[in-house]
Amino acid sequence: MPEFLKLLPPEQALILLLDSLPDRPVTVETIPTPEALRRVTAEDVLAPQPLPAFVRATVDGYALRARDTFGASDSSPAYLTQVGEIPMGAAPAFALRAGQAALIHTGGMLPDGTDAVVMLEFSSPVGSTPESGDKAAARQEIEIVRPVAEGENILLVGEDVAEGQVTIPCGTRLRPEEIGGAMALGLTSLRVAVRPKVGILSSGDEIIPPDRALLPAQVRDVNTYSLAALVTEAGGDPVLLGIVPDRLAVLKKAASKAKHECDLLVITAGSSASSRDMTAEAIASLGGPGVLVHGVNVRPGKPTILAVCEGTPVIGLPGNPVSALVIARLFVLPVIERLSGLRFRRPRPCVSARLALNVSSQAGREDWVAVQLSPGENGWQAEPVFAKSNLIFSLVRSDGLIRVPPDATGLSAGEIVTVFLT
Amino acid sequence: MPEFLKLLPPEQALILLLDSLPDRPVTVETIPTPEALRRVTAEDVLAPQPLPAFVRATVDGYALRARDTFGASDSSPAYLTQVGEIPMGAAPAFALRAGQAALIHTGGMLPDGTDAVVMLEFSSPVGSTPESGDKAAARQEIEIVRPVAEGENILLVGEDVAEGQVTIPCGTRLRPEEIGGAMALGLTSLRVAVRPKVGILSSGDEIIPPDRALLPAQVRDVNTYSLAALVTEAGGDPVLLGIVPDRLAVLKKAASKAKHECDLLVITAGSSASSRDMTAEAIASLGGPGVLVHGVNVRPGKPTILAVCEGTPVIGLPGNPVSALVIARLFVLPVIERLSGLRFRRPRPCVSARLALNVSSQAGREDWVAVQLSPGENGWQAEPVFAKSNLIFSLVRSDGLIRVPPDATGLSAGEIVTVFLT
């Protein structure tokens, strides 16, 4: 196992893991569109009808034939006969002939025989008709002082989407935009990927459930809950598998069972080296190809283990809650995205900020440093939250992480850095 | 109503709205911490105990008295007697005296009488004891070749958080970091703000529910669903109030009822000017102080209405689904945050990108332009998604929005712009 001897940079380690995953189709479910926020489409969403479904006005004005306005100007207006008003939400009851116009509202349906809308601002009724009554008023003469081109101020059928067009590609995470778009097409349910089940197993003799009274030397389980929240946020379905003591047989059994029940298994070790070693041994026992990466050239998180065991990705995280959460963002999230069938990854949310203090790092190693943001004179200022290892509240006090690339020995105060928001 | 005559820029309009909201306390509920992701704390979260709760080793090594290692070096090592090994998760069964050391693992509890840990790398057992048996092996002599200072390689009680310290301030939106932190303290439930109820009422004679067959000139309701998704994402509790026709009495009645049942009421008009006017009239009838802003100097979204009626914020959005969604991000989200008691707003997710094309704008007006991101040579490239008004799929095709500030007449191709991710 030569991978044990060299430490890969995180990006290469991730590629190795993703490339080793079997190319399985996602499991699909059909759910109501309004409940599909942040889910991932499991097929191309095709438009069953064109949108708009009818020719619509985009302004308030008069529907007419464009050629009836050719050459119209303030000094030489065109005169048309208003033959009626188009109601909203109903098809016009009449067609128009040459020389006729109909009052229309934004979003209204153009009557047959018309091909443009002239804005209200460029038209005015001429005088007033001597007769009273609706019929008469509806046949008023209209003066038009600007020409319109054919197609002006209207939306054609299918101008937003054509019938049969792919409107939302397979593998898209749904935002409010897509939810609205699907509903516009009458697609009240969508086929999406079932959320991948992500098993979270904690090990460590010193770890106890948070609702239990703490005895001396014990610490409460943090990773199960911070990771479950992260998995939820990433669109996975966390499966809390509890805490197992540092006994190899027990850990192996729990991990093996979990591997069959989950799409991704995440195991966090206890903080001791022996707990880490035991986690590695348990993962190695889960089947081939097995451990791909044992140790990543990153801080925090060097003892990370990446494995694929009989088709199931298994990630061994350091027990240290800070390392576990930072590393989970680097490795667990992309695997969840892959298992969700996500093909279109949107950029990770970040902001640019000016670094307030120097950050030192070891050349060759990638560092992730927690920073606190505050408004500065020219945008955000990022202040590194320096803390001893394993202080979870150092992450609570931070707004994001900055990356010190492997080829740098640090970052200088005053530099503009990209802060990945947490 | 002088506000009707001038158009405020969006930022000023928002401040006016927020400043006019009554200073009501949020409604509070107690929920299990693992379910509190993205909720907002309704009180300061205090540490019931210090963290760590005991003095812990941060490395594998020997717990000892620092002064026993003073001056230790390769040429002049210090020699200590190993008196045992500290198990993980249990208090040491013994205290140490001068000249003694105990094997300890990362995260282990320091025995009484010790004040530092020397790393395993700088220590080695001397020879091997002739006797066999655990007891004898435990009393081996240890050679130390580096001095440690008092407190080195350990975490003191309360070094992460002190007992009684505010660990998560009131008004914080909870991330995986805070969920983990609260569990570390044994806080298995948290007091959070009840999600504000956001009523969404659509009006417009042409609007029908998306599950209904489309007749000519009708369009399906998009805004109810895109806004509900946005409200959910922002931490609100959307209340879908359905579609009312453009009849003032009906709209007034529905709005008045909703105002009493919701913490925020959002009304989207139909696309016609008369529907917009009717929405404005209905909002104006809901009680004082009433309409604060009618018309904002922004595109899209100029006809936006901002009101506070008998203590309830009411926002009138344009019926155009593109305008409605863009404007909701500007005005609805901040109001939801305020009603959630959010005090610490994290930066809005964005990325920097190079603009691919010129964008023109009208001086004095703020424009929001949808852009599509693609990887460029030096980071992201942002291409404006130019489209006619009211094409919801122009938003589906975009990844974010860029802002053209009021004092600019446009942005130039090649400029670096901030893309607010949608």
Image (spheres, coloured by chain):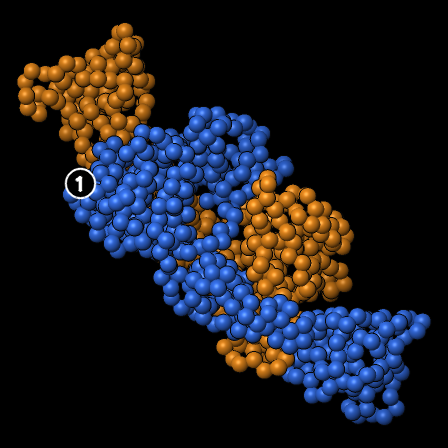
Chain colours: A blue, B orange
- Of residue B187 and residue B358, the one placed in the foreground of this image is B358
Query: In the rendering, at what x and y percent does residue A258 appear?
Result: 24, 52
Query: In the rendering, at what x and y percent does residue B253 appear?
Result: 57, 78
Q: Quadrant of the C terminus of chain B?
A: bottom right
The amino acid beneath tag 1 is Leu
Q: Is residue A248 left or right of residue B22?
A: left
The quarter holding residue B311 reads bottom right
What is the chain identity of the residue bearing mark 1?
Answer: A
Kindly identify which residue carries mark 1: A248
Q: Is residue A49 above or below residue B416?
A: below
- Of residue A386 and residue A17, the one placed in the foreground of this image is A17
Which residue is the extreme one toward the right? A75
Q: Is residue B136 left or right of residue A151?
A: left
User: Can I make out residue B232 in this image?
Assistant: no
Q: Is residue B328 above or below residue B343?
A: below
Query: In the rendering, at what x and y percent does residue A133 appear?
Result: 79, 92
Q: Residue at x 37, y 53 (%)?
A: A23
Q: Residue at x 41, y 38 (%)?
A: A12
Which residue is the extreme one toward the top? B75
Q: Is residue B49 above or below residue A93?
A: above
Q: Is residue A236 left or right of residue A61?
A: left
What is the crowding at mark 1: few (fewer than 14 residues within 10 Å), some, or many (at least 20)? some
Q: Residue at x 27, y 20 (%)?
A: B121
- Of residue A406 and residue B411, the one placed in the foreground of this image is A406
Q: Residue at x 57, y 49 (%)?
A: B374
User: Can I make out residue A251 in this image?
Assistant: yes
Q: Is residue B98 above or below residue B235?
A: above
Q: Identify the element where label 1 is drawn.
A: helix
Query: In the rendering, at what x and y percent does residue B358 appear?
Result: 71, 50
Q: Is residue A139 left or right of residue A108?
A: right
